[in-house]
């Protein structure tokens, strides 16, 4: 059964995110993608980085079905593992010792502004338990810089997020850096991306 979902933004940002990953993903091991959504990023990056095992995940069942449907559609069965049921704030994350031993990076695209602030804290705290020294945690999305929105469209987007859920909203990069530091991460790179987004690379210290 075709259960694929289509998230239009992934069509626009997959290649520019891929270019960032070219620079900062380790050459091998497992990449754990948090909040994979439709799975379109996952299958794209599994094909772009064949030496890595791309492990997609999401807390939402219809997203996990979509990811698995995309894996079948792209004929990646046997190469790319099926999506795991992972909710950032449900700890410990359901990862085996064998998986953790091979884990070389964590990628999280467009989650932290569409989730409670606790989610950011859990994301770093849990990632800090599993990533080895030097390994990257890569975030992508819109950010506020020093309490100022980086574009008028982000101000409007932030307001619309808060109208949908008062606990959502674009996060202040410096506040995220603080959380990161508290969980043993240091920001090593900030890359300005199209459409007023950023890629933010943290490394486990
Ligand atoms: C805006 S979508 C982004 C999906 C995908 N990363 C992308 O960029 O297209 C946010 C995703 O986060 C997932 N999500 C929300 N809260 C979550 C949580 N606490 N833990 C894991 N995933 C979560 C949702 O199910 C949804 O798939």
Image (tube, rainbow, N blue to C red):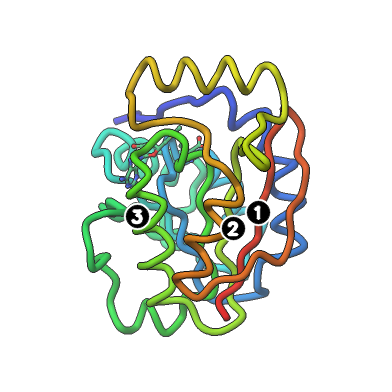
In space, the residues marked 1 and 3 are separated at their CA atoms by 26 Å
Q: Name the residue under label 3.
A: 82
Q: Nearer the viewer, residue 58 or 5?
A: 58
Q: Mark 1 points at which residue?
A: 200
Of callouts 1 and 3, the N-terminal one: 3
In space, the residues marked 1 and 2 are separated at their CA atoms by 6 Å
Residue 93 vertical placement versus 114 (above, below): below
User: Are circles 1 and 2 on residues that touch, CB within 8 Å?
Assistant: yes
Give how far across and how far down residue 191 sits, in percent.
76, 49
The mark lying in front, picked from 3 and 2, is 2
Q: Nearer the viewer, residue 108 or 155?
A: 155
Indicate left or right for 129 with 10 as reference: left
Q: Name the residue under label 2.
A: 138
Task: Classify mark 3: residues with Cα within 10 Å, few (<14), some (14-19) or many (20+).
Answer: many
Q: What element carries label 1?
A: strand
Residue 2 vertical placement versus 50 (above, below): above
């Amino acid at each position: 059964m075709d259960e694929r979902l289509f998230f239009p933004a992934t069509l626009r940002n997959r290649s520019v995110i891929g270019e960032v990953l070219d620079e900062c993903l380790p050459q091998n091991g497992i990449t754990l993608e948090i909040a994979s959504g439709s799975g379109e990023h996952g299958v794209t990056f599994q094909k772009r980085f064949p030496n890595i095992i791309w492990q997609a995940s999401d807390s939402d069942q219809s997203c996990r079905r979509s990811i698995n449907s995309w894996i079948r559609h792209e004929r990646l069965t046997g190469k790319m593992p099926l999506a795991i049921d992972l909710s950032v704030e449900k700890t410990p994350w359901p990862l085996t010792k064998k998986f953790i031993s091979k884990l070389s990076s964590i990628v999280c695209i467009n989650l932290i502004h569409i989730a409670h602030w606790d989610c950011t804290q859990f994301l770093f705290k849990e990632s800090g338990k599993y990533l080895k020294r030097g390994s990257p945690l890569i975030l992508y999305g819109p950010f506020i810089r020093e309490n100022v929105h980086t574009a008028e469209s982000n101000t409007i987007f932030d307001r619309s997020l808060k109208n949908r859920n008062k606990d959502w909203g674009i996060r202040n990069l410096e506040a995220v850096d603080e959380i990161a530091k508290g969980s043993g991460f240091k920001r090593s790179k900030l890359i300005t991306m199209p459409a007023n987004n950023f890629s933010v690379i943290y490394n486990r210290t």
